[in-house]
Every structure is written in C-alpha cells, then in structure tokens.
Image (cartoon, rainbow, N blue to C red):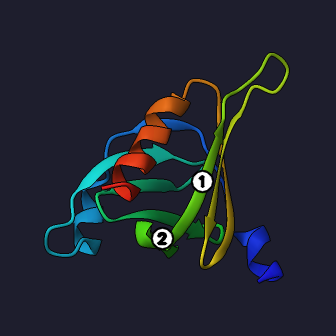
Amino acid sequence: MAETSAILAWTLVSECPIPEDVNDLLVTGEEAVAAYRTMRDSAIFTNKRLIIRDAQGLSGKKIEIYSLPYSSINMWSTENAGTFDLNAEVELWTRAGHIKVNLKKGIDIRKFDKLIANAILK
C-alpha cells in the first residue's frame, strides 16, 4: 500500500461547473453534486462517490479515472488554512489507503467537509 499513497494525493484549485461528460460515468440513481478543478484535471463529487479525472501525457488525451466509493471511507479529517499555511487539507482514510487532498485558498473547507459528511453519514 505504500506505493499508492504517493499517487493518491491531489490539489484542488477552485470550484468549477460539473463537466458534462461525467454523465457517461454515472450509474442509475447517481447524481453529480459538485466539481473542483485541479491543475489540469477535475474532481467530481456525486451522491455515491468521488471521481478524479487525471489527464496524462503532454496532450492530456489519455485520461485515468479514479473512483472512490464513499462506502470505502473509514474516517476523514479537515484542516482549515492558517496564517502562513494558505492551503486547507482533507485527509481520507479508506480501505484503499490514505488519501490527501489539498485545497487552495478560496475553496470553502466547511462546504467540502459537508459534502463528505452528507455522502458518508446518510
């Protein structure tokens, strides 16, 4: 599992509109509720899972999709940005390992926390 922990770290830059092509990934009864932009990719929260679209290569045409069902999350923590550390952080402990998500200044950490809580605690 140590090898995957380096892979499972993302930085979300800003909230963005939900990409239309995400509908091709959704199952019956699944709805996209929020999306965030990474440097060149996006993270989409649905009512069932977190989807990360990871463009690869120089052209970005090759895309890897990470899908994290909320049912696999055992615990999470959130840390708001401070005076010197401008990024907020979310950490997820899952059956797949430890995932770290950095949130750039301007992303509402409490809204993000509520997205996770609403999905997991229902």
Residue type at tag 2: Leu
Instruction: Relative to 112, say whether 1 is above or below.
Output: below
Q: Quadrant of residue 79?
A: top right
Looking at the rendered structure, which numbered label has been put on residue 76? 1
Residue type at tag 1: Trp
Residue 51 appears left or right of 75 = left
Image point (51%, 28%), residue name = 108
Q: Marks 1 and 2: CB-CB under 8 Å?
A: no
Farthest-out residue, left:
28
Image point (42%, 47%), residue name = 117
Q: Nearer the viewer, mark 1 or mark 2?
A: 1
* Quarter of the figure with the C terminus: bottom left
CA gap between label 1 and label 2 equals 13 Å
Could you say which is closer to the camera, residue 92 or residue 59? 92
Image point (40%, 44%), residue name = 115
* Quarter of the figure with the N terminus: bottom right
> How many numbered dots are placed on residues in this image?
2
Residue 12 appears left or right of 25 = right
User: Picture coordinates of residue 44 (x, y %)?
Assistant: 40, 55
Q: Is residue 101 visible?
A: yes
Image point (43%, 64%), residue name = 51
Looking at the rendered structure, which numbered label has been put on residue 68? 2
Looking at the rendered structure, which numbered label has been put on residue 35? none
Residue 97 appears left or right of 62 = right
Could you say which is closer to the camera, residue 23 or residue 4? 4
Instruction: Relative to 118, say whether 55 is above or below.
Output: below
User: Picture coordinates of residue 45 (x, y %)?
Assistant: 38, 54
Could you say which is closer to the camera, residue 60 or residue 52? 52
User: Picture coordinates of residue 77 (x, y %)?
Assistant: 64, 47
